[in-house]
Image (cartoon, rainbow, N blue to C red):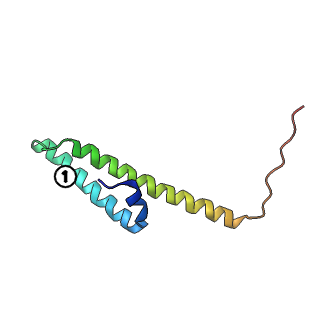
Amino acid sequence: MTKPAALREQNDDQLELLLAETQQQLFRLRLQSETERLEAPSEIIKAKREIARIKTILRQRELERQRSAEAAASPSAPAPARKKKK
């Protein structure tokens, strides 16, 4: 299990590779749980959480790139004026 801070230090390619490895590990754990007894059933939960952490970080970066692209595209666009209520 990798700490979130350590995951954030990695670039997107490393995270994609780690995501694929963790998904393969989860598949093997699920297969093993069906065919034989797992030594540590909590490993399935840990793998699922690791996948969620990686996907969350990748999504945050994607949204950050989107926001910066939108900000660069229209830096001087004024905000629409709001009407005053009576």
Tell me if residue 16 comes above or below residue 1 in the rendering.
below
Tell me if residue 21 comes above or below residue 36 in the rendering.
below
User: Residue 39 at x, y = what percent?
Assistant: 12, 44
* Left or right: 32 as drawn, with respect to 42: left
- Secondary structure under the numbered disc 1 in the rendered image: helix
Q: Residue at x 39, y 54 (%)?
A: 4
Q: Residue at x 50, y 60 (%)?
A: 61
Q: Residue at x 68, y 62 (%)?
A: 71
Q: Quadrant of residue 37?
A: top left
The furthest residue to the right: 86
Q: Quadrant of residue 22?
A: bottom left
Q: How many marks?
A: 1
* Left or right: 30 as drawn, with respect to 69: left
The crowd level at tag 1 (other Cα within 10 Å; few <14, some 14-19, many 20+) is few
Amino acid at circle 1: Arg
Q: Which of the pair 31/79 is nearer the observer?
A: 79
Q: Which residue is mark 1?
A: 28
* Left or right: 60 as drawn, with respect to 30: right
Give the position of the C terminus as an image quadrant. Answer: top right
Q: Quadrant of residue 57?
A: bottom left
Q: Which of the pair 1/54 is nearer the observer?
A: 1
Tell me if residue 27 comes above or below residue 73 in the rendering.
above
